[in-house]
Image (cartoon, rainbow, N blue to C red):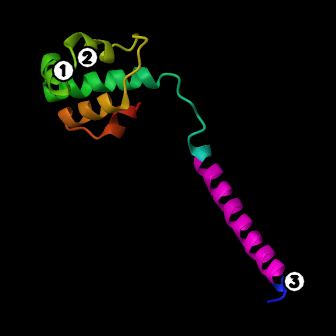
Amino acid sequence: MNKYIIKSAFRHERSHIFKNIFSIILLRSDILEQYAEYNENIKVIICKNIKKYRNEKGISLADVAEKIDVSVDHLKRIEAPNDRNNISLITLYKISIVLGVRIDKFFEA
């Protein structure tokens, strides 16, 4: 096969790849624009929602703490919006299972 044909085919394929990458970048930037607003109060929202759903379900702090394998004091700190510690995703996931609430509900203002 001729070197020119190989180079031309490679150039065409490379151009096609770059067009696909550019399309993906544009698509990703559109998606990211939807989430451009950073909510500084997200921890407060999550804490309040944990407490709200726990109270709605009528489950005590002690019961939830036991089921997710943390101390009651730790769970109190998780529910306290002014606590400086952050909740782990795994702990939030466990709480969502115990309370029977989809995890995305904790993020709703």
Nearest to the eye among marks 2 and 3: give it: 3
Q: Amino acid at mark 2?
A: Leu
Between residue 18 and residue 103, name the one nearer to us.
18
Percent x, y of residue 102: 28, 41
Nearest to the eye among marks 1 and 3: give it: 3
Relative to 1, does residue 105 appear above or below in the rendering?
above
| Horizontal relation, residue 40 to residue 55: left or right | right
**Does 53 lie within the magenta span?**
no
Q: Quadrant of residue 65?
A: top left
**Does 23 lie within the magenta span?**
yes
Residue beneath disc 2:
75
Q: Quadrant of residue 82?
A: top left
Chain-order first, disc 2 or disc 3:
3
Q: Quadrant of residue 84?
A: top left
Residue beneath disc 3:
4
Chain-order first, disc 1 or disc 2:
1
* Label disc, if present, on residue 53 of the rendered structure: none
Question: What segment carries the magenta color?
Answer: 6-31
Residues at discs 1 and 2 in contact (Cβ within 8 Å): yes
Residue beneath disc 1:
65
Q: Amino acid at mark 3?
A: Tyr
Q: Residue at x 29, y 35 (%)?
A: 93
| Horizontal relation, residue 87 to residue 15: left or right | left
How far apart are labels 1 and 2 at the CA level? 6 Å
Helix, strand or loop for disc 2: helix
Percent x, y of residue 1: 79, 89
Chain-order first, disc 1 or disc 3:
3
Percent x, y of residue 40: 53, 23
Q: Amino acid at mark 1?
A: Ala
